[in-house]
Image (spheres, helix red, strand yellow):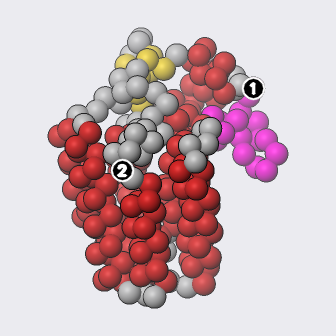
């Protein structure tokens, strides 16, 4: 498959990138694992060119590591890196949320409500241990968090938040399914965050977001 436009305006490169990224964030690949183009072609059904270009794009964000003449690997993990990433999330995301709520409008509310509805549906499937549930949950969790921040008014801040979120998500691989981060507890934290945001309680929402990030981090730390 090439990089020409597909139905809906999506190119093969866009689709390959999204599929590989979703699998990286949901833990489908082990840390520091070799990513072979032929294996990825068989997995996703795309041609070699969009796969290579997607890997190059992912390497720019640090989710994939490129080594000259040796190809691509998934990024390694470490406790020290995880703590640094969590600290950065605690610094950036609450500030972005404060800005987003201050600028909040009906379009922002609609984006957040839609993202939360999709996430709630995936949480039900996750509790039921449906096939592919964690991969889909990871995608919708990301979408919900970024929807909350989406009205912050700074593309750079939103970009930084998204990239740091993606790197912390790599550490959450299968932890929810293993019971380390209980589904119900995480769901309750999301609901409280949504309610505070829609009340335009910016400080309260920022506090709940910090608490949510800290609670998830504490649960993950115990499993690392």
- Image quadrant assignment for residue 12: top right
Work out whether residue 153 or residue 176 is closer to the camera in this orientation and state it. 176
x and y percentages locating residue 86 in the rendered image: 26, 53
**Residue hosting label 2:** 181
User: In the image as oriented, which residue stretches furthest toward the top?
Assistant: 69
Question: Is residue 13 a member of the stretch shown in magenta?
Answer: yes
Give the left or right position of residue 12, taking residue 89 as reference. right
Check disc 1 and report its element: helix, strand or loop. loop
- Image quadrant assignment for residue 117: bottom right
- Image quadrant assignment for residue 32: top left
How many numbered marks are there? Answer: 2
Query: Residue at the location (20% across, 47% down)?
Result: 83
User: In the image as oriented, which residue stretches furthest toward the right?
Assistant: 7
Whether residue 65 is situated above or below residue 90 in the rendered picture: above
Front disc: 1 or 2: 2
x and y percentages locating residue 26 in the rendered image: 48, 39
Contact (Cβ within 8 Å) of mark 1 with mark 2: no
Q: Is residue 159 visible?
A: no
Q: Which residues are magenta?
A: 1-16
Whether residue 159 is situated above or below residue 42 in the rendered picture: below
Structural crowding at the residue carrying mark 2, measured as other residues with C-alpha within 10 Å and reported as few (<14), some (14–19) or many (≥20): many
**Residue hosting label 1:** 1
């Amino acid at each position: 498959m090439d990089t020409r436009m597909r139905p809906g305006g999506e190119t093969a490169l866009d689709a390959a990138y999204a599929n590989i990224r979703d699998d990286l964030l949901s833990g489908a690949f082990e840390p520091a694992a070799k990513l072979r183009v032929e294996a990825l072609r068989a997995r996703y059904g795309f041609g070699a060119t969009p796969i290579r270009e997607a890997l190059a794009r992912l390497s720019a964000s640090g989710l994939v590591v490129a080594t000259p003449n040796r190809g691509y690997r998934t990024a390694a993990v470490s406790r020290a890196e995880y703590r640094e990433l969590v600290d950065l999330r605690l610094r950036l995301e609450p500030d972005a949320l404060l800005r987003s709520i201050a600028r909040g409008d009906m379009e922002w509310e609609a984006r957040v409500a839609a993202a939360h509805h999709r996430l709630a549906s995936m949480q039900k499937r996750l509790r039921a241990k449906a096939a592919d549930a964690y991969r889909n949950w990871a995608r919708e969790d990301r979408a919900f968090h970024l929807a909350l921040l989406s009205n912050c008014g700074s593309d750079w801040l939103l970009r930084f938040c998204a990239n740091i979120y993606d790197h912390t998500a790599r550490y959450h691989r299968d932890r929810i399914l293993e019971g380390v981060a209980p589904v119900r507890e995480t769901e309750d934290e999301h609901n409280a965050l949504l309610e505070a945001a829609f009340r335009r309680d910016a400080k309260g929402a920022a506090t709940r977001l910090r608490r949510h990030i800290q609670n998830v981090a504490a649960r993950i730390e115990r499993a690392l």
